[in-house]
Amino acid sequence: MNARIVKQEGGKITLEIDMELKGSMLTQEEAIQLALNEAGKLATRTALENFDTDGKPISVKGQRLTTKGVKKK
């Protein structure tokens, strides 16, 4: 199973997900869940890059969050 960003233009991304559906229904449902979670993590990571690109910390519910130094391309 694999998820990847295949296209990114402006505020829009296109994700591609590969998964193998075999075995019992439960096994297939678990494979779908894992693949969609992986895609969701990629989309969330991309969305977060829009908010903390200059290195300044952001505050969420009183917690100070900082960047690891990766700048927007």
Image (tube, helix red, strand yellow):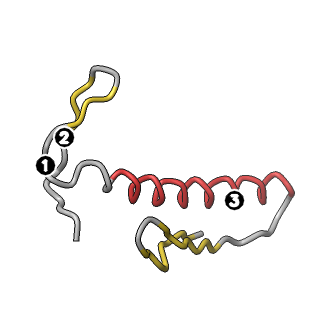
- Secondary structure under tag 2 reads loop
Identify which residue is drawn at 77% across, 54% down: 29
Q: Nearer the viewer, mark 3 or mark 2?
A: 2
Disc 2 to disc 1: CB gap under 8 Å: yes
Tag 3 residue: 31
Whole-angstrom CA distance, mark 3 to mark 2, is 33 Å
Whole-angstrom CA distance, mark 2 to mark 1, is 7 Å
Farthest residue to the right: give it.
25
Q: Is residue 43 left or right of residue 29?
A: left
Q: Which mark is residue 55?
A: 1
Q: Amino acid at mark 3?
A: Ala
> Where on the picture, by quarter, is residue 64?
top left
In the rendered image, which quarter contains the N terminus?
bottom right
Query: Residue 11 at x, y = what percent?
Result: 44, 65
Mark closest to the chain's N terminus, 3 or 2: 3
Mark closest to the chain's N terminus, 1 or 3: 3
Q: Is residue 21 above or below residue 26?
A: below
Disc 3 to disc 2: CB gap under 8 Å: no
Q: Amino acid at mark 1?
A: Gly
Q: Nearer the viewer, mark 1 or mark 3?
A: 1
> Where on the picture, by quarter, is residue 10?
bottom left
- Secondary structure under tag 3 reads helix
* Circle 1 residues within 10 Å: few <14, some 14–19, many ≥20: few
Q: Amino acid at mark 2?
A: Thr
* Circle 2 residues within 10 Å: few <14, some 14–19, many ≥20: some
Whole-angstrom CA distance, mark 1 to mark 3, is 37 Å
Mark closest to the chain's N terminus, 2 or 1: 1
Query: Residue 13 at x, y = what percent?
Result: 49, 69
Query: Residue 4 at x, y = what percent?
Result: 49, 72
Tag 2 residue: 66
Query: Residue 23 at x, y = what percent?
Result: 82, 64
